[in-house]
Structures are given as structure tokens and as C-alpha cells.
Image (spheres, rainbow, N blue to C red):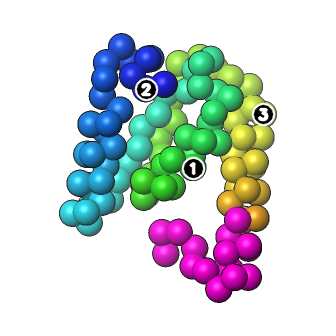
Amino acid sequence: MNDFLSHTRTFELKNRVARTIKDEGWPMVMNVVIHRMNIDHIDRIIGMAHEMGAEYLVVEQEYHPLEEEVERAAERHTAERRGSQGASRSRGGRRAGR
């Protein structure tokens, strides 16, 4: 969706830069603009930030969604992470990023 919305082919470049930042041991900030076309995917965006190792996620709004929408998406993501972490712990696994 990044390439579609920005009218550029930069998503893979951004992923490579993120990997370089983490490989060098630097803290990473992921900046995301939320709008009508991606508000329904905010839980996936939060997951992607976690997978990339971002220490901070800055969320900007191009339009102003209801606060409840963002809160519900964040709660859904948190519940899913807790569920998957509980399952990995019961199998002796480690939490991602720890």
C-alpha cells in the first residue's frame, strides 16, 4: 500500500533502511500516516513496527478517525500479541524482540 499511496516504489527501500538501522544497533522510529485507506489495517501496521524492531511508532492522521477506531485496533493487536506470546511461552519459546 505504501507504493500505491506515495506513487513511488519505495517500500522495499524503506525495509532495507530499517534493517540497516537495526543491524547498526540504532533506535528506530517508524512514522505512519493514518487515513481512510489504511485505518482498517492499523493493527497490521503496529505489528509491522514490532516485527521491524521499531522502538517508537509515530502515528499522524491525515483525517481524524474516531478515537474509538484507533483504540479498538490497538486493543485487538495487544490481545493478539498476548495470545501468541502465551502460546509460545507454553511451548518454551521466547518473546520476539527480547
Residue annotated with mark 3 = 68
Q: Give whichever of 53, 27 is nearer the camera.
A: 53
- In the image, residue 9 sits, relative to residue 97, either above or below, namely above
Total label count? 3
Q: Position of residue 23 (x, y in %)?
A: 25, 63
Q: The residue tagged with tag 1: helix, strand or loop?
A: helix
Q: Amino acid at mark 2?
A: Asn
- In the image, residue 72 sits, relative to residue 69, either above or below, namely below
Q: Position of residue 60 (x, y in %)?
A: 50, 30
Span of residues in magenta: 84-98
Q: Amino acid at mark 1?
A: Gly
Q: Quadrant of residue 3?
A: top left
Residue annotated with mark 1 = 47
Q: Residues within 10 Å of mark 1 (few under 14, many from 20)?
A: some
- In the image, residue 90 sits, relative to residue 28, either above or below, namely below
Viewer-nearest of discs 3 and 1 = 1
Q: Earlier along the polypeptide chain: callout 2 or callout 1?
A: 2
Is 9 situated left or right of 59 in this image? left
Residue annotated with mark 2 = 2
Q: Give whichever of 63, 95 is nearer the camera.
A: 95
Q: Amino acid at mark 3?
A: Glu
Q: Residues within 10 Å of mark 3 (few under 14, many from 20)?
A: few
The residue drawn where x is 57% and y is 73% is 95
Is 23 situated left or right of 52 in this image? left
The residue drawn where x is 77% and y is 40% is 72
Q: Position of residue 71 (x, y in %)?
A: 73, 41
- In the image, residue 90 sits, relative to residue 20, either above or below, namely below
Q: The residue tagged with tag 3: helix, strand or loop?
A: helix
Q: The residue tagged with tag 2: helix, strand or loop?
A: helix
